Amino acid sequence: MGVLLTSVPSPRTIGRIRKEFLALPLEVQAGYKLVRWPDSFGSPDLPWEAASDVLELIRSYPDGDYRCTVRLAWWFWRVTLAAPALDFVMRRTMATVLAERELGGQPMVNKVVKERRG
């Protein structure tokens, strides 16, 4: 059974959100872009050094439907560099949490580290 949408944002709401987005610095806007193979690499979006790890991430989505943002790709690459021995699911989960925390302006990992020590 499909999901029935009972309310959608008004054109005014969409316009307000779009205006707020366009007011963000370009480097912040770039994090919302979807990764495009190979166009996203060798540009300010992602370095070619990240290509192998990001390709692993892209290939994990079923049927090639990779709706992976540049922000998530950056974090997946960073986690992979820091902990290459972690299995793929753990690296993707950590990257997702870190990307979401970055968007929300939350501290990245300090809370988790303190909880594990305590």
Image (spheres, helix red, strand yellow):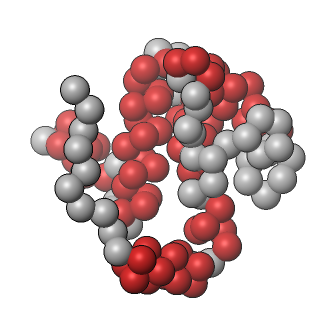
Q: Residue 26 location, x and y as percent?
A: 67, 73
Q: Nearer the viewer, residue 26 or 94?
A: 26
Quadrant of the snapshot with the N terminus? top left
Q: Nearer the viewer, residue 59 or 50?
A: 59
Q: Residue 69 location, x and y as percent?
A: 57, 46
Residue at horizontal 69%, vertical 26%?
55
Q: Is residue 98 above or below residue 9?
A: above
Residue at horizontal 42%, vertical 40%?
96
Q: Residue 67 location, x and y as percent?
A: 55, 38
- Quarter of the image for residue 9 reads bottom left
Residue at horizontal 77%, vertical 46%?
40
**86 horizontally vs 25: left or right:** left
Q: How many marks?
A: 0
Q: Residue 104 location, x and y as percent?
A: 36, 63
**50 horizontally vs 8: left or right:** right
Q: Nearer the viewer, residue 28 or 22?
A: 22
Q: Is residue 75 visible?
A: no
Residue at horizontal 79%, vertical 58%?
44
Q: Is residue 16 above or below residue 115?
A: below
Quadrant of the snapshot with the C terminus? top left
